[in-house]
Image: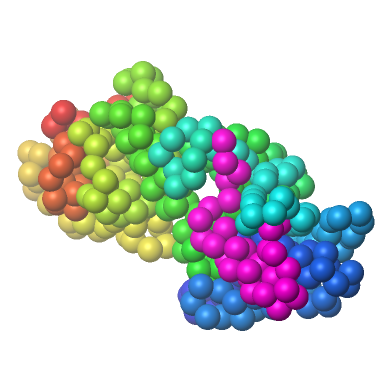
């Protein structure tokens, strides 16, 4: 199996917010001049000026519509290849820029997000980018800049099923995201963004206990154990650091972390990124945890040379050594150190069948 290329070798892409801005620029220019530009150039928040080609250009009575196919570069973005369409119309005098959610763009239904309930899920930075460029074009053509912009992503409602939007209370489609306009391959910024917004929604709902899971098996187990609402469940994935660092500044009273034994073993060893390509399970270190759990010299040696964390767990279970409890306890200590107070933590380790194998206590 070939190794993943390092990030500097991978092609960067453009966020949905950048594509929406470029489409809105093209449509507004066409609304004012009757002509669509061949290439649309926009300025991103950090000064870059990428160019975009139009996939759709259509105008009619009092409207113009432009579309751009999103290119996420080499990032496995769910919206890669989707068309981002902006429909621009003249608005009421003094209205400024008004945003609407078209097909495939969600609407906010829960408090806690940086947008009000009922607003289209077009995030603040993309809104600011569009407002700024519309203002500049309006000044160029001596127009009022009072426009209504409807952003659509055909097929977006189906694509949104692969995201955490439903859990965040964003209904009907995708969010238009992007803080820099640039997609950095495998940075997984959209996943970490969803973790942060999930915490915001839980805090806005005054929830005192949230549960974060590394995968679906552990999440289902946590759901059954605590009978938590959907808004209390955070799909942490491999991003323990993204979760804990945000909770440090935005605490909740109680956090339960649930995950597979091997992932939590890496957390117990101090890793905050649990992905297999970015952190490795240190078997000699795991053998020291087995020793602390009461394993004899022969078992400690066997754990140290085990092929996988699962094999180490099975060796200890056969010998009635509670290695998973020790791992959960150490993982809790790492999490508590990252949080620096404000949130109590319990860590639960599960096997591949969703059976509880380790418990740190602490709640």
Q: Is residue 81 shown to the viewer in this render?
A: no
In the rendered image, residue 227, in percent from the top left (x then y), is placed at: 36, 18
Residue occupying the point 67% across, 44% down? 101
- Foreground of the two, 123 or 174: 123
Looking at the image, the residue that sits furthest to the right is 60
Q: How is the image coloured?
A: rainbow
Quadrant of the rendered structure where residue 277 is?
bottom left
Give coordinates of residue 183: x percent, y percent: 55, 67
Q: Residue 3: horizontal and vertical position, in percent?
A: 51, 69
Q: Which region shows up in magenta?
A: 118-147
Q: Is residue 43 visible?
A: yes
At horizontal 34% and vertical 53% (from top left) the residue drawn is 242
Image quarter hosting the C terminus? top left
User: As displayed, is residue 325 above or below residue 104?
Assistant: above
Q: Quadrant of the N terminus?
A: bottom right
Decide which of 220, 205 is in the foreground and name it: 205
Q: Where residue 70 sits in the image (x, y, percent)?
A: 70, 62
Q: Is residue 93 above or below residue 33?
A: above
Instruction: Give the residue displayed 30% in from the left and 29% down from the top.
Output: 206
Q: Is residue 315 magenta?
A: no
Tell me the quarter of the picture where residue 222 sits. Answer: top left
Q: Residue at x 13, y 32 (%)?
A: 362
Comparing 192 with 7, the one in front is: 192
Q: Report the residue that reaches farthest toward the front.
A: 93
272, 266: nearer the viewer:
272
Left or right of 4 in this view: 303: left
Q: How many numbered badges does the structure rendering display? A: 0
In the image: residue 193, left or right of residue 159: left
Tell me if residue 42 comes above or below residue 128 in the rendering. Answer: below
Let me know if residue 140 is in the magenta part.
yes
């Amino acid at each position: 199996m070939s190794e993943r290329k390092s990030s500097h070798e991978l092609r960067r892409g453009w966020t949905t917010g950048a594509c929406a801005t470029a489409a809105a620029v093209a449509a507004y220019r066409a609304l004012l001049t009757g002509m669509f530009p061949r290439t649309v150039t926009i300025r991103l928040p950090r000064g870059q000026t990428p160019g975009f080609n139009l996939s759709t250009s259509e105008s009619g009575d009092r409207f113009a519509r432009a579309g751009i196919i999103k290119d996420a570069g080499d990032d496995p973005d769910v919206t890669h290849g989707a068309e981002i369409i902006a429909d621009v119309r003249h608005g009421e005098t003094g209205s400024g820029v008004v945003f609407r959610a078209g097909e495939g763009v969600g609407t906010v239904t829960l408090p806690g997000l940086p947008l009000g309930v009922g607003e289209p899920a077009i995030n603040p930075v993309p809104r600011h980018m569009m407002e700024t460029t519309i203002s500049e074009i309006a000044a160029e053509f001596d127009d009022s800049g009072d426009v209504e912009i409807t952003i659509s992503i055909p097929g977006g409602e189906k694509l949104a099923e692969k995201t955490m939007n439903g859990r965040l209370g964003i209904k009907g489609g995708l969010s238009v995201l992007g803080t820099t306009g640039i997609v950095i391959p495998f940075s997984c910024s959209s996943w970490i963004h969803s973790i942060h917004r999930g915490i915001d929604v839980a805090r806005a709902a005054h929830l005192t206990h949230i549960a974060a899971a590394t995968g679906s098996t552990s999440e289902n187990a946590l759901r059954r154990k605590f009978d938590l609402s959907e808004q209390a469940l955070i799909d942490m994935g491999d991003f323990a650091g993204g979760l804990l660092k945000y909770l440090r500044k935005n605490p909740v009273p109680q956090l339960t972390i649930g995950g597979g034994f091997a992932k939590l073993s890496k957390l117990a060893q101090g890793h905050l990124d649990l992905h297999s390509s970015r952190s490795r399970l240190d078997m000699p270190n795991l053998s020291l945890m087995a020793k602390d759990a009461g394993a004899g010299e022969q078992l400690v040696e066997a754990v140290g040379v085990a092929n996988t964390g699962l094999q180490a767990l099975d060796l200890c279970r056969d010998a009635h050594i509670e290695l998973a409890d020790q791992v959960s306890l150490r993982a809790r200590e790492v999490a508590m150190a990252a949080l620096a107070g404000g949130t109590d933590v319990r860590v639960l380790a599960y096997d591949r069948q969703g059976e509880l194998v380790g418990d740190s206590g602490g709640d």
